[in-house]
Image (cartoon, rainbow, N blue to C red):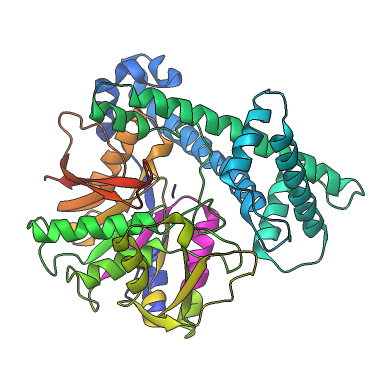
């Protein structure tokens, strides 16, 4: 999800605008065409309401559903802790689990008879889980360990009890087994999608793959490269003119906590996509540095707090540092490697990166210090894009460009359609949404597909993204 911010204003003005711009639920008159067009696939608690009573029930339903969506953040946090357990290096000297070891664990989680490989992998998992549990009980200043501890406490584990270390260890191992079972289900769904005779149908199925999964905040750099490649194509084909972008909205920018690919835990938690979007727009000449504004829309309190703290510290002159890891084992395409090399040259300056732990072989790290005068203008808006939009009426206050990568995949067709309506409401006429999901275009919608760009990250099968461009037509 991969799964709040904004640039270019003084701190006092940014604080005032954040307070002034509120979120509102999608009104019934906007939802009604979607309800009618998708009547056969509505959720049961809407489908069972007679059509003549649906308007009266709508406000109650959207508020209830908003609470349910926000509750999915808890499951996403648990998934992030699983990644931290499997791949983190800050709390243990045990090696990270490899893909082969995870596959052997997956077999055991699905009831297969354990073999030597799965027994060995299980022992490594238990060692890492014990080390993380002990770290939670120690007095350490590690934001990821503290977050994992809070997640365990939310699950009912009391760390003041003598047995808490073993209890947390067992709980996390069970969570790993759950994630492996879920992953097997996703892989089966992907295989079934590939058997469809139509590539568009396959993309549509993959685009809602995680509709029942917790909302995860983990993020990585390659989708930002895909966005830049798409913007470059749009400039070259005349879809976007130089200097035409002034306001950008990033929906669900995510936090680099411990992603299973590019994410590591030896540098502070960070958010990257808002700066990546500004960096690309400036590099391509699509927006002017002195005019560009970048807002972030998110429903995660963690993301909102991170963005607001970042902006407040920048207001005191503190730059924001982004660490960028390059893993030689990923065998990225040369164009993606080049993107990694020049990332940030429009929004910041190079900085000495943090040291890479000896346990991580083949990792090259570079760092960018984002200029405080940019970072202090970040604005964070609490918006559930499926059911809410920012309450702006004038076109001048709306967005020229919205970005939503690895976000809409967490919702089904009905909720994606609601999200597209909300997105259309906050885009300027002629503005674009860029997303790596294929969304249903309903009759009467003001959002229409304007083509797509496919980008490969490496030569590995399915290692890439297709960015679809949706344009507000009126």
- Residue 375 percent coordinates (x, y): 41, 75
Residue at 40%, 69% (x, y): give it. 378
x, y (%) of residue 429?
A: 14, 51
The reply to whether residue 387 is visible in this rendering is: no
Q: Write down the region rendered in magenta.
A: 292-311
Pinpoint residue 402: horizontal percent, then vertical percent.
28, 54
In the displayed structure image, the side of residue 161 where residue 141 appears, left or right: left
Location of residue 361 (image quadrant): bottom right
Answer with left or right where residue 143 lies relative to residue 374.
right
Residue visible at 36% across and 77% down?
374
**Point 38% across, 17% down: residue:** 47
The quadrant the C terminus occupies is top left
Of residues 6 and 54, the one nearer the viewer is 6
Q: Nearer the viewer, residue 131 or 164?
A: 131
307 falls in the magenta region: yes
What residue is shown at x 23% (from left), y 27% (from top)?
33
């Amino acid at each position: 999800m991969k799964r709040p911010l904004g640039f270019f204003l003084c701190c006092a003005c940014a604080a005032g605008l954040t307070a002034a711009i509120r979120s509102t639920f999608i009104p019934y008159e906007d939802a009604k065409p979607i309800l009618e067009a998708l009547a056969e696939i509505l959720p049961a608690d809407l489908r069972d309401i007679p059509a003549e009573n649906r308007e009266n029930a709508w406000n109650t339903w959207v508020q209830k559903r908003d609470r349910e969506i926000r509750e999915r953040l808890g499951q996403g946090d648990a998934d992030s802790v699983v990644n931290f357990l499997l791949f983190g290096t800050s709390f243990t000297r045990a090696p990270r689990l490899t893909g082969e070891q995870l596959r052997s664990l997956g077999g055991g989680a699905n009831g297969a008879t354990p073999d030597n490989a799965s027994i060995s992998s299980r022992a490594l998992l238990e060692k890492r889980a014990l080390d993380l549990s002990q770290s939670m009980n120690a007095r350490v200043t590690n934001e990821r360990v503290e977050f994992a501890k809070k997640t365990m406490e939310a699950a009912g584990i009391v760390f003041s009890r003598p047995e808490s270390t073993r209890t947390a260890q067992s709980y996390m191992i069970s969570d790993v087994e759950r994630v492996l079972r879920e992953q097997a289900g996703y892989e089966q769904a992907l295989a079934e999608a590939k058997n469809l005779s139509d590539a568009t149908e396959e993309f549509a199925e993959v685009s809602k793959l995680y509709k029942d999964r917790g909302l995860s905040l983990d993020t990585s750099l390659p989708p930002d490269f895909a966005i830049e490649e798409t913007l470059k194509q749009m400039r070259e084909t005349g879809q976007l003119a130089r200097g035409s972008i002034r306001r950008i909205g990033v929906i669900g920018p995510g936090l680099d906590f411990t992603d299973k690919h590019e994410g590591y835990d030896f540098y502070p938690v960070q958010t990257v996509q808002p700066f990546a979007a500004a960096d690309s727009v400036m590099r391509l000449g699509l927006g002017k540095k002195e005019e560009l504004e970048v807002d972030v829309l998110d429903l995660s309190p963690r993301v909102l707090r991170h963005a607001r703290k970042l902006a407040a510290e920048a207001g005191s002159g503190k730059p924001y540092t982004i660490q960028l890891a390059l893993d030689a084992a990923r065998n990225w395409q040369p164009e993606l490697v080049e993107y990694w090399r020049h990332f940030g040259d429009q929004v910041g300056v190079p900085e000495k990166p943090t040291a890479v732990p000896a346990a991580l072989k083949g990792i090259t790290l570079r760092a960018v210090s984002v200029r405080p005068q940019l970072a202090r203008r970040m604005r964070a808006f609490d918006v559930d894009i499926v059911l809410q939009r920012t309450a702006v009426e004038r076109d001048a206050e709306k967005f020229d460009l919205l970005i939503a990568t690895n976000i809409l995949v967490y919702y089904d067709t009905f909720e994606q359609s609601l999200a597209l309506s909300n997105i259309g409401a906050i885009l300027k006429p002629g503005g674009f949404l860029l997303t790596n999901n294929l969304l249903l275009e309903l009759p009467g919608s003001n959002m229409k597909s304007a083509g797509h760009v496919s980008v490969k990250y490496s030569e590995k099968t399915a290692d890439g993204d297709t960015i679809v461009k949706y344009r507000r037509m009126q």
